[in-house]
Amino acid sequence: MIGWRGASRYYDETYKPAFGLECIAFKEGTERDGLTNIKPMSPFCRTPEEGRKVIQVMNEYGLKQGKTALKSMSCGEIPSNVVVADQFSEVFDGFSIARTT
């Protein structure tokens, strides 16, 4: 299970249907209910390509960036998120970076 966590689950054929249910709920919240504060977060996204795979699955379930107020976010949890932040910013609408003390 160490390698099968975070964003990698979302596009894995085994977990994809479960993520699809989440996507349907996000879509209903934004389109049907008009909510503007829904921001799906992709945790532990290791590469921009992995992020694109997640966005592709979201598209398959009708979640399109820019179509509604929905913003696709990524957690800034690993070094690659900072090292190639410019590339990640081309994939996601924003980041959540937690500060620890």
Image (tube, rainbow, N blue to C red):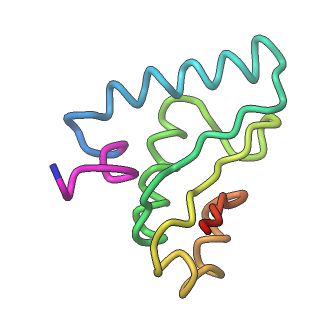
User: The C terminus lies in which quarter of the figure?
Assistant: bottom right
Left or right: residue 48 versus residue 39 is: left
The residue segment tinted magenta is: 2-10
**Residue 18 placement (x, y as % from top left):** 35, 25
Q: Position of residue 72 (x, y in %)?
A: 65, 48
- Number of marks in the rendered image: 0
Is 45 included in the stretch rendered in magenta?
no
- Above or below — where is 34 with respect to 69? above
Residue at 26% across / 44% down in the picture?
12
| Residue for point 47% across, 52% down | 43
Q: In which quarter of the image is residue 10?
A: top left
Where does the image place residue 93, in percent across and percent down from the top left? 72, 57
Question: Which residue does the image show at 58% across and 30% down from the upper left?
Answer: 62
For residue 87, above or below residue 94:
below
In the displayed structure image, the side of residue 65 where residue 100 appears, left or right: left
Q: Which residue appears farthest toward the bottom when viewing the image? A: 83
Which residue is outermost to the top? 32
Name the one closer to the observer, 97 or 27.
97
x, y percentage for residue 58? 52, 39
- Image point 48% across, 70% down: which residue? 48
Q: Which residue lies furthest to the left in this view?
A: 1
- Please, is residue 2 above or below residue 70 in the view? below
> Is 86 positioned to the left or the right of 31 in the image?
left
Q: Is residue 9 in the magenta section?
A: yes
